Amino acid sequence: MAEELRIPPGPAAHRGRPIQIRLNGRAMRAYEGETVGAALHAEGERVLMRSIKYPRPRAPLRNVGKSANGLTRTAGTPNPAACTPPAPHGMRVEPQN
């Protein structure tokens, strides 16, 4: 009988305590240590910005911080990639156009 292959739980499997972030003034659920992009994606928000030349919707693609498609305005600071900063409780996030 073959042994069952199991992946040991790692940091990605652990969720921190529930927190709240705000997108355009709306309260959104997040978890401590989760990135802004992951929290917004889990809450159903896919469009985080629109392209400059044409107003086409843009969203994070690779979630490694190197894509220009998931830029937001977080805590009043323009252009951070949504997939890199962890979401602190009460963070204000706005889509960027």
Image (cartoon, rainbow, N blue to C red):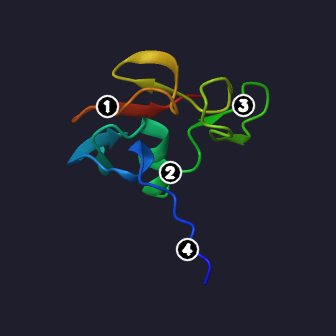
Q: Work out whether mark 2 precedes mark 1 in sequence or the reverse, and give the earlier one.
A: 2
What secondary structure is marked by label 4?
loop
Image quadrant where one finds the C terminus: top right
Q: Position of residue 88 (x, y in %)?
A: 27, 31
What secondary structure is marked by label 2?
helix
Q: Work out whether mark 4 precedes mark 1 in sequence or the reverse, and give the earlier one.
A: 4
Q: Is residue 52 above or below residue 5?
A: above
Q: Is residue 53 above or below residue 89?
A: above
Image quadrant where one finds the N terminus: bottom right
According to the picture, the residue beneath numbered tag 2 turns out to be 41
Which callout, 3 or 4, points to the residue nearer the camera?
Answer: 4
According to the picture, the residue beneath numbered tag 4 turns out to be 4
- The residue under label 4 is which amino acid type? Glu
Which callout, 2 or 3, points to the residue nearer the camera?
Answer: 2
Q: Work out whether mark 3 precedes mark 1 in sequence or the reverse, and give the earlier one.
A: 3
Check residue 92 in the rendering and tell me which mark sits there, or answer none. Answer: 1
Q: Is residue 55 above or below residue 77?
A: below
Which callout, 4 or 2, points to the residue nearer the camera?
Answer: 4
